[in-house]
Amino acid sequence: MRWTTRIAAAALIAILQACATPPAQTPPPPAAIAEARPPVTILISIDGFRADYLQRGVTPNLSRLTAEGITGPMRPSFPSKTFPNHWTLVTGMVPDHHGIVGNRMEDPAHPGETFTTANDAPYWWNAAQPIWVAAEKAGIHTGTVLWPGANVAWGSSATKADHGDYPGGIRPRDWLQYNQAISNKQRVDTALDWLRRPPSNRPRFLTLYFDRVDMVGHDHGPDSPEVTQAVAQIDAQIGALVDGLAVLHQPANLVVVSDHGMSETSDTRVVTLDLPADSYHLIEAGPFAALDPLPGKEALVEKTLLGRHPHMECWRKAEIPARLRYGTNPRIAAIFCLAEPRWMIQEKRPEAPFTHGEHGYDNRAPDMAALFIAAGPAFGHGTVAAFDNVDVYPLLRDLLGLPPRADVDGDDAPFRPLLRSR
Ligand code: AMP
Ligand code: ZN
Ligand code: ZN
């Protein structure tokens, strides 16, 4: 029996039992059983879960959701990095528009400050409104069990001067400060604990975030047994979530995604930047390199880098190919170089391998393909044609009944034929 059907059947039996028995003679059934709960929406990210990990034979729970719901190949946005793509998934905008253009960035409007993954100063994030802010504004209680950007007091105009306290910002009503040490089980248990509360204090939209598959992918490479084991561990947690929801008789629309895939890297596949150290300022290197020439060195840097090289191509930001939808944001460096999948750009040749897996490459590269599965009462059954991850926000908006927004780059069209009318 479908798990959603199981939940509905158990709830129906409980309601029938409650109706059939004279109330005066028996104690009232527990509130969790007697109550017909409205469905909640749970957005789950398995960071770095490459689409083909589903074929490894270790994901019975994800495979069941796939069989019962909808699935399809999802393209990440460029660059295929964690923070840009998690922000795209919850805003519907490409990184060039939402402003989280890399995991590491600088902003001409805030000289001397650098964005790194731990940075929650709102001005980095304010250009695009995440789904939990739209929901909270509409009176929907939200709860985030981790998500890049969910610990930001969104909308506040405060800058670094008042770091730590951003009056006026909006956060999810329930949220957790990111800490890698929070176990996968604790993450699932936290979501279930929030759903165990009385109706007046219970989230209707939740996120869950797992970073283990990404971390192991970097350390051991996508084809390693360690990644397969990490995938199995997270799949077991998805199973625990589904079981916990059934115990609560809580119907749920689950949208399971990843932010990008993973490509095998090696210290034998390295492109070095052949530039004098005093000619440029490097913001980020790896699957791509973002750099600004120092004053007076523009011609030298451009002459050395622009154009095709073995395993790498470089552009002025305005000339980045249109298909990448990247290059207008002021936070993007003047010169941008992109490596072929499996290759790495470094300032100098490294002496030892740094990682065995990386992402950040062309978002259409097969290695970067992301996971997408959606199952629950709102979904029919079928496969969606290849789509971009900017379309996930419009889907979430439909599930929550929020109005469309004109600034969004995505569209719910890929999913509409597979959504059951509510
Ligand atoms: P990357 O693989 O370089 O794109 O970065 C992904 C890593 O970011 C994950 O493996 C997490 O360890 C880390 N991370 C995820 N969420 C947060 C957060 N909210 N704050 C700081 N680091 C995070
Ligand atoms: Zn990631
Ligand atoms: Zn990663």
Image (cartoon, grey):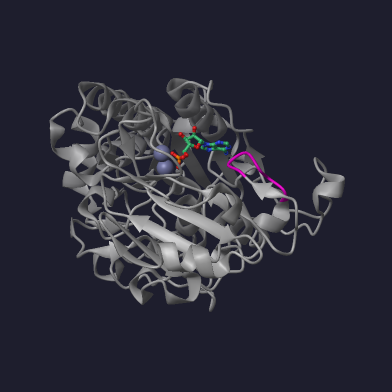
Instruction: Give the total of numbered labels.
Output: 0
Quadrant in the rendering for residue 382 = bottom left
Q: Residue at x 25, y 35 (%)?
A: 268
Of helix, strand and loop, which mostly describes the magenta segment? loop
Which quarter shows the C terminus? bottom left
Instruction: Please state which of residues 420 and 228 is positioned toward the viewer in this rendering.
Output: 228
Q: Name the quarter showing ligand 3.
A: top left
Q: Which residue is drawn at 21% across and 38% down?
A: 53
Q: In this view, does 363 lie to the left or right of 18?
A: left
User: What is the x, y in percent for residue 109?
Assistant: 74, 64
Q: 33 above or below 251? A: above
Q: 418 above or below 262? A: below
Q: Residue at x 52, y 61 (%)?
A: 91
Residue 316 shows in this picture? yes
User: What is the x, y in percent for residue 276?
Assistant: 52, 51
Query: Residues in magenta?
Result: 116-121
Quadrant in the rendering for residue 388 = bottom left
Which quarter shows the N terminus? top left
Q: Is residue 296 left or right of residue 275?
A: right
Q: 25 above or below 246? A: above
In magenta stretch: residue 370: no
User: What is the x, y in percent for residue 146?
Assistant: 54, 37
Instruction: Please state which of residues 356 and 315 is positioned toward the viewer in this rendering.
Output: 315
Q: Residue at x 60, y 45 (%)?
A: 150
